[in-house]
Amino acid sequence: MTIKDSLKNIKSGKLELVYLLKGNDSFLHSFFINKVCKYYFEGSNYSKTLILSDEMSGKEIIAKLLNEDLFLTKEVIIIRDPQSIRGKCRDDLIKYCTTPLENKILILIIDDWFDKSVITKKISLSAEVVNVQTPFESEMRLWAKFFFKKENITVNSDVINLVANIASDSLAHLKNEIEKICIWSNDKTEITSRDLKIFSGWQRQRFRWEFLMAVGNRNLDDSMFLGKNLITKSESFLSLIYPLTALFQEMLYYKLNHGTFSPNRGYTSLSNSLKKNIPKFSKQYSTEEIGDIFEYLGYIDKNIKSASLNEENEFIQFIEAGVGKYA
């Protein structure tokens, strides 16, 4: 079930006693839990307990769940990574989910949407499963509108699209970027795309995203222009080595998995707008070329740290050799 539909049910009074949140977006974890607490406790005092399964034994977790308050105090219990619970305690947790106590709400969190462990399959039969993966880019735009609205800032579609593009790797990142922009705006009630060009911190991140997109598309002219703009104004070539490595690493994984690698289950921290283009990017580079680029980036990283090199010259040579080769 989508988080939107689940929260709609909760708001209308259809509150479940067990929820299984699947997905690794930390903002959505907190957002969902806070909404549950708001509607479950309705402003009264409450107890909320977070349990990390690697810091508490299975027996202690089950004891906490089964402990009944004589005064029937309502309680929300959150358990992270329940799939790590083993043996009889795992069976007891599954059993509890089928017959939960009326004065407790249990929220289980599993970061991996693709987890297929026994406990996940069995709990899914009795719990409400809520998708808390980082939303796709189209939904990110809706969240961006929501965050700006909360800050009482009016923005146009250009601003929404730009912000969603550079911060689509997680909702926490998106929210943080919007908060920084709103603080920078100095009490302005409306922000335009022209205003964002003045905001140097945001501009740097935007250019980095655009630069990586140009490299992925093997656009030599744009890669050279955007990269030089970055390293002469706000970054160093050294700071670009990690995101470049991440970009080519995604391409390599895609190739090694014969095109079955899912862009939404990335191995690196690239934004969704870049991840979804990995299949297209991978067609621009051969496996051998990617291997050469990894070797070249390693060479540059070592030499920049150990010698006084002109980073702009090193950058130009890398773009010409890596992006421009056979282009």
Image (tube, grey):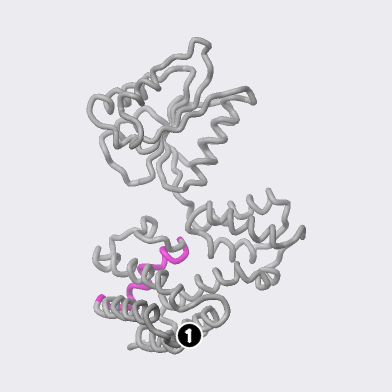
Q: Position of residue 7 (x, y in %)?
A: 54, 36
- Compare residues 205 and 94 and report the one nearer the observer: 205
Magenta: main secondary structure equals helix
Question: Residue 281, located in which quarter of the rendered image?
Answer: bottom left
Q: Residue at x 56, y 30 (%)?
A: 37
Q: Position of residue 115 (x, y in %)?
A: 31, 43
**Quadrant including the N terminus:** top left
Question: Residue 40, located in which quarter of the rendered image?
Answer: top right
Q: Position of residue 163 (x, y in %)?
A: 59, 63
Q: Residue at x 65, y 63 (%)?
A: 157
Residue interval drawn in magenta: 272-287
Number of marks in picture: 1
- Compare residues 261 and 67 and report the one nearer the observer: 67
- Compare residues 82 and 142 and report the one nearer the observer: 82
Q: Residues within 10 Å of mark 1 (few under 14, many from 20)?
A: many
User: Which type of secondary structure does the marked residue at label 1 adopt?
Assistant: helix
Answer left or right for 31 relative to 90: right
Examine the structure image and report whether residue 6 is included in the region drawn in magenta: no
Answer left or right for 78 relative to 139: left
Answer left or right for 311 relative to 122: right
Residue bearing the label numbered 1 = 224
**Residue extending furthest toward the top:** 70
* Amino acid on which the number 1 mark rests in the picture: Met
Answer left or right for 46 relative to 62: right
Above or below 312: residue 168: above
- Compare residues 164 and 34 and report the one nearer the observer: 34
**Quadrant including the C terminus:** bottom left
Q: Position of residue 192 (x, y in %)?
A: 70, 66
